[in-house]
């Protein structure tokens, strides 16, 4: 039984067909990579799954229940955690407080006007930060973090929601190559341990081939290939439209 | 039919005047992203300068035209000076500080005008041609209004040509669409901004001079005009010139017919139109969504609990405040009571504006609603003071929540301007509904019961309530709710993605802010023994903004510091000089230029720097 199932999803902006007729599913504990050149429609697809955008066509189901048509908040409540291509964090808070917010929301403690945040879920937040390697930065202002650390923080925040499905839009952008592999292997471990389904996009092919169980290739809004690493590497259509521009460098 | 046409023409004449003033405002906003509060003051200057020029010229039409153009030129030059002296220094400041700086300019211009031309209204003697009439559909229609009707489209046409047929116009349009791009192209932004500001100021001056034959030069023009101009610009869509024209016609015609059909509520009508338009078209008739790139790049500093030294200072201040009636008396006790009210006024605004990220130009609305709730209950039902003090926050909170239903989805400048519109509605109701509110005369005899008549007792009560509420608000800001509110401000997508109910959080912030502010209004009402429409006036709303921005948005203690400093400053100024507006305005401008993060923010920065060294 798959966690996420996407059927015939489509979206256009004005005249631009950003995504059309995309179908796929992700199983618990599976790492599914979505690759494609810039402007292929990856973020648009993520945003339709996460509820940030409403699809023009098709449906999204999570654990059998339809979530397309719900807003981002309701989707999050259904157990979807996500990171954004352009990191989105709470700049006026410390690193720990960012994670505490996710925990407070998940435990339905937001509508409390009395108890100090400082006393809530500090230890749990630190544990999540330790998992992504940010424990030393817990007290720092989010605004001063390096971009790679912001990406890590976003992962910790997404995990605070105890997600069934994790959407990661370019989770390793701005990191050094060694860090990328480390972060994605961490994600891989979490996915396996907790049975989280992970859908991610990534431009670094080494990372993709290293950690992904399965790979989807999107081009101009449509899926053109699907399979494991070797199959994708060998796929002539993929080589033509995607790796063809990029194959030499990897 | 015979009565519709003249009415329509009257509306179109009004529309032309509205367009002249709002065209400059919208172009300036489009290019510089500054909401220029002083635009009405420029029009006022135009009226006065126009009066001085026109009364010295021969009375023939051609001389009139020449004088009007000379006035426009003069105000354009004043605009250049303003831009170079003030606005240029605040382009990188947060939006609200820019607004505050331009309000400082409003105050300065008010006093300068008073000094130069005196307090009395200056009507323009009208030669025969200005009093002429033409026959329209069987009734007499003023010739001059026909001239005005022609001028609106003429100016629109000229502006369109300038914007679409010159290199300068291309740059202006590009800057309106994407400021960063123009900067990247290596265009001299300073000259572009200065020229745009000069044009806007010139148009305002033109509008001022052209208004003379139908009105007169007087000191009330600035604020009444700016409210109208805000409405037009917002309805039309910020930065859109055709939008401003469309909105001017819509509102001008609506006003003309409104006066005939429902004379009592014309003011309300105009602002209702604005509310309706914004609910259905949040970016105005022809506006495009605002890009908020600048907000995102300025990271707000982390909010941390006050350091022990500051808590100690707070405790000492509080102890002094409690002991104050034994030390000072009479007049100073009144000032201190006012300061307590100011604390409620400022902390409530800060609550929605700082952590909530929802700026308000009309915070006095809640103050006034609270005051009127208490006053009306006493006046019409003889309700005792405790009931009044309870009813005030309930009433203000309820209305604020109702208002919130329409506006929580709006963002930034639009929300702020809609708050101004709402405050104007509340003001109009209090002013025009004479049978119930007493109109301009207000409600008198709103005194506390005998047991609280002693000024010392009343002061202590005010102190307890304001400090109590301020502490509750502070508590809420450090609790999960306050953090969530701030989270929604910091990054709305992230807040939603972790399951936060952004609209709900904002609604509650509006209700809380309204209620706390309403309580302040009631305390003020009983303290002064009356309730008046001025409680809801624009200058009063701006006072709240001043307090909050003086204290700084990013610290929880900020609004309290701001309230105290402002109350003290205003008191000293009003008593020591007739030119207090001039001094206050200058102080505001200097503060905004020197301390973009407010007093408390600047102190905190120095403190942190001192500790790191
Ligand atoms: N809000 C929007 N309005 C209009 N067009 C959009 C919008 N968002 C995306 N597009 C267009 O849809 C297409 C897909 O964009 P999308 O951001 O999904 O691509 P992507 O695969 O994530 O690219 P990248 O690798 O650069 O992140 C692009 O042509 C883009 O210009
Ligand atoms: Mg993308």
Image (cartoon, coloured by chain):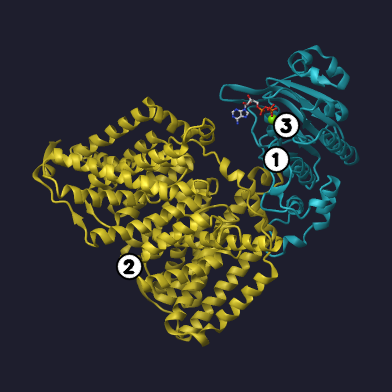
Per the rendering, the colour in which chain A appears is cyan
Q: SS at mark 1?
A: loop
User: How far from the left and from the top, in percent, is residue A239?
Assistant: 79, 14
Per the model, the C-alpha gap separating discs 2 and 3 is: 60 Å
| Residue under numbered circle 2 | B438
| Residue under numbered circle 1 | A87
User: How far from the left and from the top, in percent, is residue B111?
Assistant: 32, 61
User: How far from the left and from the top, in percent, is residue A21?
Assistant: 70, 21
Q: Would residue A166 be found to the left or right of residue B334 on screen?
A: right
Q: SS at mark 2?
A: loop
In the depicted structure, whether residue B500 falls above or below residue B398: above
Q: Would residue B66 be found to the left or right of residue B414 on screen?
A: left
User: How far from the left and from the top, in percent, is residue B149?
Assistant: 24, 37
At a point 71% along the width and 28% down the height, the residue shown is A42
| Residue under numbered circle 3 | A60
**Looking at the image, do the residues carrying marks 2 and 1 touch, with CB atoms under 8 Å apart?**
no
In the depicted structure, whether residue A66 falls above or below residue B294: above
Q: Chain of mark 1?
A: A
């Amino acid at each position: 039984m798959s966690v996420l199932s996407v059927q015939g999803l489509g979206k256009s902006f004005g005249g631009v067909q950003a995504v059309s007729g995309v179908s796929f599913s992700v199983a618990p504990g599976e790492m599914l990579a979505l690759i494609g050149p810039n402007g292929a429609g990856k973020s648009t697809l993520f945003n339709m799954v996460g509820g940030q955008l409403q699809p023009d066509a098709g449906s999204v189901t999570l654990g059998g229940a339809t979530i397309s048509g719900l807003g981002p908040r309701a989707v999050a409540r259904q157990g979807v955690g996500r990171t954004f291509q352009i990191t989105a964090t709470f700049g006026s808070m410390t690193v720990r407080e960012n994670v505490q917010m996710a925990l407070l929301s998940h435990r339905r403690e937001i509508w409390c006007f009395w108890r100090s945040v400082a006393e809530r879920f500090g230890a749990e937040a630190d544990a999540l930060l330790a998992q992504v390697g940010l424990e030393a930065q817990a007290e720092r202002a989010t605004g001063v973090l390096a971009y790679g650390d912001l990406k890590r923080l976003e992962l910790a925040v997404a995990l605070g929601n105890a997600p069934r499905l994790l959407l990661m839009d370019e989770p390793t952008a701005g990191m050094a190559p060694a860090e990328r592999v480390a972060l994605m292997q961490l994600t891989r471990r979490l996915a396996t341990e907790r049975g989280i389904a992970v859908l991610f996009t990534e431009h670094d092919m080494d990372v993709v081939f290293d950690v992904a169980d399965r790979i989807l290739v999107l081009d101009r809004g449509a899926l053109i290939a699907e399979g494991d690493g070797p199959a994708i590497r060998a796929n002539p259509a993929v080589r033509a439209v995607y790796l063809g521009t990029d194959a030499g460098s990897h | 039919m015979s009565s519709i046409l003249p009415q329509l023409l009257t509306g179109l004449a009004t529309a032309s005047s509205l367009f002249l003033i709002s065209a400059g405002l919208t172009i300036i906003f489009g290019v510089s992203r500054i909401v220029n509060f002083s635009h009405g003051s420029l029009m006022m200057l135009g009226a006065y300068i126009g009066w001085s020029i026109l009364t010295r010229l021969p009375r023939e039409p051609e001389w009139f035209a020449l004088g009007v153009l000379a006035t426009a030129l003069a105000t354009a030059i004043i605009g250049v000076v303003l831009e170079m002296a003030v606005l240029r220094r605040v382009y990188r400041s947060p939006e609200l500080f820019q607004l505050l700086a331009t309000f400082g300019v409003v105050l300065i211009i008010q006093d300068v005008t008073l000094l130069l031309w005196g307090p009395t209204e200056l009507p323009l003697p009208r030669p025969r041609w200005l009093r002429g009439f033409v026959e329209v559909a069987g009734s007499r229609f003023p010739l001059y209004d026909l001239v005005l009707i022609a001028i609106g489209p003429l100016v629109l046409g000229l502006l369109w040509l300038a914007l679409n047929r010159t290199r300068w116009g291309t740059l202006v349009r590009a800057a309106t669409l994407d400021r960063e791009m123009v900067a990247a192209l290596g265009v001299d932004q300073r000259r572009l901004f200065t020229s745009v500001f000069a044009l806007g100021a010139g148009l305002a001056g033109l509008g001022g001079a052209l208004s003379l034959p139908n009105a007169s030069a007087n000191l009330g023009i600035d604020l009444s005009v700016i409210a109208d101009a805000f409405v037009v610009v917002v309805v039309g869509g910020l930065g859109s010139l055709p939008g401003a024209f469309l909105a001017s016609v819509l509102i001008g015609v609506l006003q003309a017919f409104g006066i005939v059909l429902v004379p009592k509520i014309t003011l309300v009508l105009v602002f209702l139109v604005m509310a309706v338009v914004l609910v259905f078209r949040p970016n105005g008739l022809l506006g495009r969504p605002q890009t908020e790139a600048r907000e995102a790049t300025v990271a707000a500093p982390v909010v941390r609990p006050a350091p022990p030294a500051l808590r100690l200072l707070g405790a000492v201040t509080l102890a002094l405040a409690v002991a104050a009636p034994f030390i000072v008396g009479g007049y100073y006790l009144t000032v201190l009571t006012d300061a307590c009210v100011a604390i409620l006024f400022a902390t409530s605004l800060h609550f929605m504006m700082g952590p909530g990220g929802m700026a308000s130009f009309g915070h006095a609305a809640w103050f006034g609603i609270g005051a009127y709730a208490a006053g009306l209950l006493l006046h019409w039902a003889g309700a005792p003071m405790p009931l009044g003090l309870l009813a005030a926050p309930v009433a203000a909170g309820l209305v604020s929540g109702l208002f919130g239903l329409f506006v929580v989805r709006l963002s930034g400048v639009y929300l702020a301007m809609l708050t101004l519109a709402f405050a104007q509605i509340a003001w109009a109701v209090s002013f025009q509904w004479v049978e119930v509110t007493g109109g301009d005369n207000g409600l008198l005899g709103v005194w506390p019961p005998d047991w609280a008549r002693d000024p010392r007792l009343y002061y202590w009560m005010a102190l307890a309530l304001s400090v109590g509420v301020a502490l509750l608000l502070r508590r809420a800001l450090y609790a999960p709710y306050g953090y969530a509110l701030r989270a929604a401000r910091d990054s709305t997508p992230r807040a939603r993605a972790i399951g936060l109910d952004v609209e709900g959080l904002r609604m509650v912030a509006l209700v809380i802010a309204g209620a706390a502010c309403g309580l302040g209004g009631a305390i003020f009402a009983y303290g002064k023994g009356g309730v008046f429409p001025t409680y809801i006036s624009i200058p009063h709303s701006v006072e709240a903004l001043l307090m909050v921005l003086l204290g700084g948005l990013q610290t929880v203690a900020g609004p309290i510091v701001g309230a105290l400093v402002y109350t003290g400053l205003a008191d000293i100024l009003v008593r020591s000089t007739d030119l207090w507006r001039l001094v206050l305005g200058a102080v505001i401008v200097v503060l905004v230029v020197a301390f973009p993060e407010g007093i408390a923010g600047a102190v905190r920065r120095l403190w942190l720097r001192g500790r790191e060294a």
